[in-house]
Image (cartoon, rainbow, N blue to C red):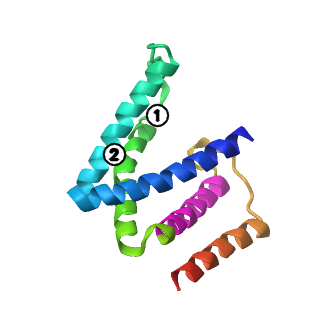
């Protein structure tokens, strides 16, 4: 249950962040908004990490992380830019809907192929029906 609560919180906040970033992008530019968001996110994560760890960040395990994964945070700049641009062009509802479909499609691939060391999962008809219904929902929203 805790996982679902965090998922819902993250989903709600990413939507609010996208709309806020869109406004920042209108005022100062899309890449500038992405940079500002990355910077404020870094500061917030650093402060929260230090608060949770009592000022002892424990970065020793960083050496165990595969170099390929260390660049994951850099993807956020493209994600933020893409979301801002999408919201400007098609609005928040269609943007978030398209993002959800893209996330589900990519997670289907990750799960079914076992990429990134994730346990391989078989996809069956119900999962494909669910994804198809979401795509149909976005098409209907766009009409």
For residue 122, above or below residue 39 = below
In-image side of 100 versus 17 (left or right): right
Crowdedness of circle 1 by 10 Å Cα count: few (<14), some, many (20+)?
A: few
For residue 71, above or below residue 136 = above
User: Which quarter of the picture shows residue 25?
Assistant: bottom left
**Residue 9 picture location, percent across and down:** 59, 46
For residue 110, above or below residue 96 = above
Q: Is residue 63 among what the camera can see?
A: no
Q: Considering depth in this image, is 69 or 41 the residue closer to the camera?
A: 41
Q: Main secondary structure of the magenta part?
A: helix
**Residue 31 picture location, percent across and down:** 25, 55
Specify the segment rendered in magenta.
Answer: 95-113
Contact (Cβ within 8 Å) of mark 1 with mark 2: no
User: Which quarter of the picture shows residue 109?
Assistant: bottom right
Residue position marked by numbered label 1 in the rendering: 66
In-image side of 52 versus 104 (left or right): left
Q: Which mark is residue 37?
A: 2
Q: Quadrant of the N terminus?
A: top right
Q: Residue at x 63, y 55 (%)?
A: 113
Q: Residue at x 46, y 34 (%)?
A: 66
- Element at label 1: loop
All told, the count of numbered labels is: 2
Residue at mark 1 to residue at mark 2: CA–CA distance: 26 Å
């Amino acid at each position: 249950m805790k996982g679902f609560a965090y998922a819902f919180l993250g989903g709600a906040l990413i939507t609010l962040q996208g709309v806020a970033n869109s406004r920042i992008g209108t005022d100062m530019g899309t890449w500038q908004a992405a940079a500002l968001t990355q910077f404020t996110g870094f500061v917030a994560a650093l402060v929260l990490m230090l608060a949770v760890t009592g000022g002892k960040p424990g970065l020793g395990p960083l050496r165990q992380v595969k170099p390929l994964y260390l660049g994951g945070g850099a993807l956020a700049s493209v994600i933020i830019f893409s979301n801002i641009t999408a919201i400007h062009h098609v609005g928040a509802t269609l943007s978030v809907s398209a993002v959800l479909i893209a996330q589900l499609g990519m997670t289907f691939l990750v799960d079914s192929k076992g990429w990134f060391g994730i346990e391989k999962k078989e996809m069956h008809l119900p999962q494909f029906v669910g994804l198809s219904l979401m795509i149909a929902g976005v098409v209907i929203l766009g009409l």
